[in-house]
Amino acid sequence: MKTYKGYLIDLDGTMYRGTEKIEAASDFVKALVKAEVPYLFLTNNSSTTPEKVADKLNQMDIPADANQVVTSSMATAAYIQQQKPNASVYVIGEDGLKVAIEQEGLLVSESEAEYVVVGIDREINYEKLAKGCLFVRDGATFLSTNGDVAIPTERGLLPGNGSLTSVISVSTGVQPVFVGKPESIIMDYAIQKLGLKHEETIMVGDNYHTDILAGIRSGMDTLMVFTGVSTEEELLNEEIKPTYQIHSLLEWIPNIM
Amino acid sequence: MKTYKGYLIDLDGTMYRGTEKIEAASDFVKALVKAEVPYLFLTNNSSTTPEKVADKLNQMDIPADANQVVTSSMATAAYIQQQKPNASVYVIGEDGLKVAIEQEGLLVSESEAEYVVVGIDREINYEKLAKGCLFVRDGATFLSTNGDVAIPTERGLLPGNGSLTSVISVSTGVQPVFVGKPESIIMDYAIQKLGLKHEETIMVGDNYHTDILAGIRSGMDTLMVFTGVSTEEELLNEEIKPTYQIHSLLEWIPNIM
């Protein structure tokens, strides 16, 4: 069995389910700490901050520091900053996205925009969408933190960022660049943050269409755990399989060293 | 030249451009009145009422009564009433849509929905979209007044109803039934209201992709006038041409009798 020098780890469905802890998660991450194997948590959720994610994990007895968390907002901000330092950005999104954009040194602007970025925004309104359309038609580069079409909640599946983003793409005919899983932009950002190579790192997650595909597309090995969205049966229909499949993260601990 | 017993007439780009009157429009419609040829105005705009449309036309010296106006909202309401009398309908949209739904005898409801209807709503918010998604996932029939992706305004092209509708279709994976032009549902409704047959009626409009296609798809002859969206050059690329093409409605008046 290959030994990995670094781990990228999904959150929902892998570390917890909503507010419910997944029991094996704590032991799994503690094993990484004990073996001194670096790891990062990766989330498509653009509305949160690394601090909030680390707090939630710590409350579940999972060792996590804010600087071990990568959100799609952070990857989006870094992507823009690399393409065009200090660019002006029109942001549709919640605090986690605005904070990330500003922390990269970009200019959040309502009046000019070299970039339009859309993240989940539960305060969405027509004027925000109108401005986004006008800026995109005016030539701004169009980004979206992630393409998830639905968000699981107690009420059922609510509109995800991929569906809000579609207002602008359908209206303007311009397709956005998506940053989050399964795209490789967020993966490349995380790998660079770890300071490792793709082939030295493994992606761990429960969702074939986001976590595992993200790993596959960016040339990493993948560890799929059936504690969340995807089932063993669904996987039978997928042509490209994860590198490894397990039912509990506990099974994997012997491979951490 | 064939003589038509009835006329369906588009508004924006055909009778006026925004707030600006198209000069020939008044004489054209007055010729229909003089010849006692029945006509209806057809608009995809779901936010307005027949009364408001008639007022606007009258102010431009175009003879119009409220009962000569068909909006996509009216056609949507009639379509539902025909499918399932007195059904409960969850409505995302402005006054014109809600009034039309209620006037058909349908029940506008926030708590139950056999139908979800989306029309342009400049007070759109996340909760409205969330409810729409939940009802559609729960099995409600999904309708949209029209698929127009952009609305021309002084500020530029703003999001049209087709783009708002996409939030629900992208999130749920369920495609709506569109009612407005170029779909035939609104055409069949208008033809029935005129009490004529498709082959006795002609559709007049400036937009190939809505007005003219609507006529073609519903088996009517079409009169295209180059005073709005579509140009003579663009038409060269279309395989199926309008029955007639003119540069001003004045050219057509000799054919009205």
Image (tube, coloured by chain):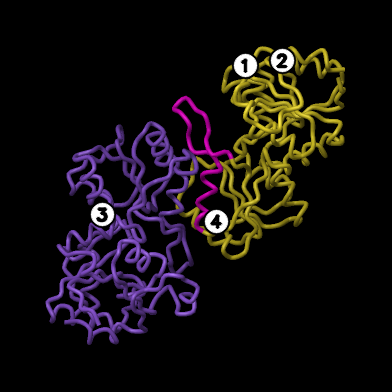
Chain colours: A yellow, B purple
From mark 4 to mark 2, how far is it between C-alphas?
41 Å
The kind of residue on which mark 2 rests is Ser
Q: Indicate whether B201 appears above or below B22.
A: above
From mark 4 to mark 1, how far is it between C-alphas?
38 Å
Asked if labels 4 and 2 share a chain, the reply is yes
The kind of residue on which mark 4 rests is Gly
Which image quarter is the C terminus of chain A in? top right
CB under 8 Å between discs 1 and 3? no
Describe residue A154's horizontal placement relative to residue A203 as left or right. left
| Residue bearing the label numbered 1 | A21
Of badges 1 and 3, the one in the foreground is: 3
Report in which chain the residue with disc 2 lies.
A
* Callout 4: SS: helix
CB under 8 Å between discs 4 and 1? no
Q: Which comes before the other along the chain, label 1 or label 2? A: 1
| Residue bearing the label numbered 2 | A26
What span is in magenta?
Answer: A148-171
CB under 8 Å between discs 2 and 3? no
| Residue bearing the label numbered 4 | A132
Q: Indicate whether B232 appears above or below B192.
A: below
From mark 4 to mark 3, how far is it between C-alphas?
31 Å
Q: Nearer the viewer, residue A10 or B143?
A: B143
| Residue bearing the label numbered 3 | B75
* Callout 1: SS: strand
The kind of residue on which mark 3 rests is Ala
